[in-house]
Amino acid sequence: MEADGEAPVYYVISDLHIGGDEQLGDVAFLPELLTFLRRLETTAEPAELVINGDLFGLWEFTESQGVAKFDTLVERYPDLFEQLRATGAEIPITLLPGNHDTELAAYEEYERLLAAYNVTLVRAESLTRPLGDRTIHFEHGHRQDPNNRFEDFGNPYEKPLGYYYNTLVTSRAGRLSDRGRYNWLKDVQAVTPTERVPRWLLSKYFYREMRPTLRYALLPVLLLFNVSIVITVLAALDVAGIWTMPVTVTDDVLAQLGLVGEAVHFLLVANVVIVGILLLASIPVYLVLRDLSATIDRFGIRETDLTVDPDEPYREAAREVFDERPDTAVFCYGHTHRPMMSVVDNRLLVNTGTWLKRLHRRDVVAGLLPPVYYPSYHLSIVRISAANDADGNGNGGDSDRDGYESANSDNRNSSDSNGNRNSSNSSKNGIIVEYTPADKPSPAANEMTLLERLLTLGRAPALEYPDRAYVTESGTTIDPDD
């Protein structure tokens, strides 16, 4: 695995959430994951794969308990476990539990079960790895999330709030998903933060579950709602005799268009009537919502208070680690499903993203139509390596990061009881951190309705990742021009 004098290379993935009840068991990215593992199996690099939490979705299994869930996983995904066995025979594979698979830390039996597939389970909330004379810190990230934090990590009886959401909501969605007009409800696990689920449900109901006749009857009203308000105001001014010119001119123009003009006139009148009714009904609704909003404020439970800040808690955690262990160069975490890099105290904070489907909200420009949630896959792989001694400018390691070159090797670094690895190899020209994602086409063509695709035309999310970062003794830079 590692030749004498060569610094290790770490490949890091997280948040795959493999497993769960019924429809949650469908792993759309399994072919890409197997391809990635096969490349690591034949790489010439001194590589180690670090799975930084939530490889499995054990919370989402409600029909089996304890280590019996592992038997279900092996039975359901035999190709995955055989490939883990093959890859783990060539390079170290280290698995750190996350919140969704925290049960891995609760039962010693999991260590033996995973070891049979050449996966080393570290039953802790963090681990470190050396790179030259610096250290890389890994943790899943749930410790900074009050809804998923454990006071006694590894205690099988401790259940944070996130556990109940996933067992009662996410797993049930997996059992019910195939009852819809389209198998979409299982994607609730891709909606983050969870406070956005109600808006997502409204969107999927309108574009997927609503009867087509009702949807297309409401479409012009909702799409032209803003225009209809203007027309309603002008019609009121015309009836009151205050300003009749706009209505008179419009009637004259439509009269010259024959049947087309009559159809447009009927549509406008129908919109005005509907909007007028809605405006009248909205007055008491507004008063009720205003009073409800004041009540919510008194209890301090606005969405901004419930939603976990995606970045700042991890900056604070990174600062604590950097202060406690000054040799730490990189703080690597997952959990939030958002690939990002940030410089913190001249060191690097990096998120490993997710392999789950990602849903990008796209608001409809006009009217009151629900937002559209555009699906895509960002199969994030973070590569952490030493800079190339030969050129000394931090541009090394490129030969393997795309193809992972074919070769076999079998040396392993030694680890202590907490999974922290010791290595005498050293490279003092700095550290490179970069994303080498696996490609997977967007499922939009199959999962979005024609209406959704039309409303988001030209606004598909770009598959962008943070730029390559360089960490040296003198500081950290994220280079957009590399």
Image: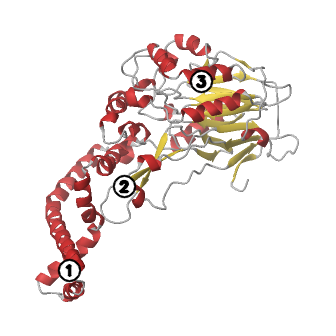
Instruction: Kindly identify which residue carries mark 1.
Output: 234
Numbered disc in front, either 3 or 2 = 2
Q: Are marks 1 and 2 in contact (CB under 8 Å)?
A: no
Picture quarter containing residue 407? top right
Badge 3 amino acid: Leu
Counting residues from the N terminus, which is met first, the one under dot 3 or under dot 1? 3
Badge 1 amino acid: Leu
Counting residues from the N terminus, which is met first, the one under dot 3 or under dot 2? 3
Residue 317 in the image: x percent, y percent? 56, 36
Badge 2 amino acid: Pro
Instruction: State the separation of the CA atoms marked 1 and 2.
Output: 29 Å
Left or right of 127? Residue 459 is: left
For this rendering, which residue is in front, 207 or 231?
A: 207
Q: Residue 95 bears which disc, if any? A: 3
Residue 187 in the image: x percent, y percent? 40, 39
For this rendering, which residue is in front, 343 or 84?
A: 84
Q: Are marks 3 and 2 in contact (CB under 8 Å)?
A: no
Q: Residue furthest left?
A: 240
Counting residues from the N terminus, which is met first, the one under dot 1 or under dot 2? 1
Residue 404 in the image: x percent, y percent? 73, 35
Vertical comparison of 309 with 409: above or below:
below
Instruction: Kindly identify which residue carries mark 2.
Output: 371
Q: Are marks 3 and 1 in contact (CB under 8 Å)?
A: no
Vertical comparison of 370 with 204: above or below:
below
Picture quarter containing residue 260? bottom left
For this rendering, which residue is in front, 474 or 96?
A: 96
In this rendering, does residue 94 appear at all? yes
Q: Residue furthest right?
A: 390
Image quarter where the N terminus lies is top right
Left or right of 141? Residue 84 is: right
